[in-house]
Amino acid sequence: MSSGNSATAAPASSSASASPALPTALVVFLAFCCGAVVANLYYAQPIVEMIAPSIGLSTTHASLIVSLTQFGYALGLLFLVPLADLLENRRLLVTFTLAAAVCLAAAALSQTPSLFLLCSLLIGLTSVAVQILVPLAAHMAPEESRGRVVGNIMSGLLLGILLSRPLASTLAQAFGWRGVFFSAAALMVVMALVMGWLLPRRMPAHRVSYPALIGSVFTLARRYGVLRERSLYQGLLFASFSSFWTIAPIELIRQHGFSQNGIALFALVGAVGAIAAPIAGRLADAGHGQRGTLIALLLAPLALFAGALPGAGWWWMVVTAVLLDFAVQLNMVLGQREVYALDPHSRARLNAVYMTSIFVGGALGSLVASPLYETFGWTTFVLLSAVLPGLALLKFILGGRGVTRH
């Protein structure tokens, strides 16, 4: 780790290309950290019906548990992640991860709705540590392998999203819902200790006030057309991804007789799409980012169309899940690789804009999913979901490739 320590003395402007290749074990650990931290956002989703009556929360307001967590994460993306371009990164990561552990433990101990909902908001807020970790890994990786490293680490993030639900269901059945949050809190403590030991220090070169830093986030969004475009593409894809994963378990239970264990297996199979991340990294490093983007934007609507085929059984939903996850992950990593290249000194803030658009898209997709499904049924719902990545594909074909980097 000597290379990381030397980065402490050198300004953040040091050439990334001079960095040695990251050890495979470190990349695997960072990918695990990404998945474990982002999973904090999703543990409650499959066990809301267990949590709500236990803390005295009405079924009418039970959805606040999930929505407040997502809202807290969005706030953190905008107002906390940019701190990584101002403050020392390793200390920031360890602080947020330990704070997440405290919030998870407090949620496990909560006996009232107000306290648990406050904890839900704070869990989302502190879990933005994952979006500080990814740009830090990009700084640590040499230029020629940066896309591959980011892709491998991002596969951990998608796996965390996909596997958190079946994991929460399994743990809740064995230890109760409080056991889920206690387990997550313990994991965060262990991860914080290991990150403090393994990761190098990185002090950004920026020396501005916090208000100026936050203002610069919006300045970056205005300055870079590539950032706006990549954010739009991934926001639309993630909206369709979130809407599909919101409704697919309901459809499987209602129409195909799946049990909770069956839903867990379905989510595990869908996680196969995470293999797109390292593939995307290699495509980007080889200069095939535009071609990979076209493949992703074509694949997403086609995957959803497969789920809407007349007489399609549940196994077509498996096909949709795998291909849609693959497309979303492929486009996400390609977009990150291109966004990170815009300004090495502003990667945390660029990442904040990019990821905020993704989770806003995901929140909106989830918000409209249930009304669309209940009103029109599965087939129409899936076809309407396919419109979103279709719009991204149309934008890419008509003019996306001509956007300049500055």
Image: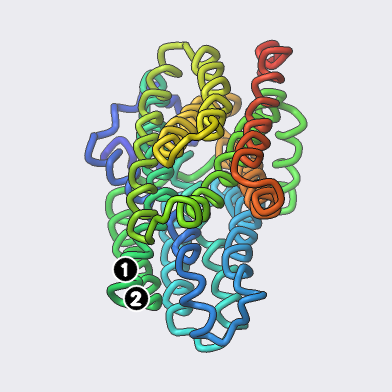
Q: What is the quadrant of the N terminus in the image?
A: top left
Badge 1 amino acid = Leu
Residue 98 lies, in percent from the top left, at: 42, 66
Q: Is residue 314 above or below residue 94?
A: above
Q: Quick check: can you spot residue 179?
A: yes
Badge 2 amino acid = Gly
- On residue 179, the disc is 2
Residue 342 lies, in percent from the top left, at: 60, 25
SS for tag 2? helix
Indicate left or right for 209 with 152 as reference. Answer: right
Q: Which dot, 1 or 2, sits closer to the camera?
A: 1
Name of the residue lying farthest toward the front? 311
Indicate left or right for 96 with 33 as reference. Answer: right
- Residue 141 falls in which quadrant of the image? top left
Question: Which of 377/262 is in front?
Answer: 377
Q: Are marks 1 and 2 in contact (CB under 8 Å)?
A: yes
- On residue 171, the disc is 1
Q: Residue at x 39, y 34 (%)?
A: 273
Question: Which of 403/275 is in front?
Answer: 275
Residue 243 lies, in percent from the top left, at: 60, 46
Q: Residue at x 66, y 43 (%)?
A: 361
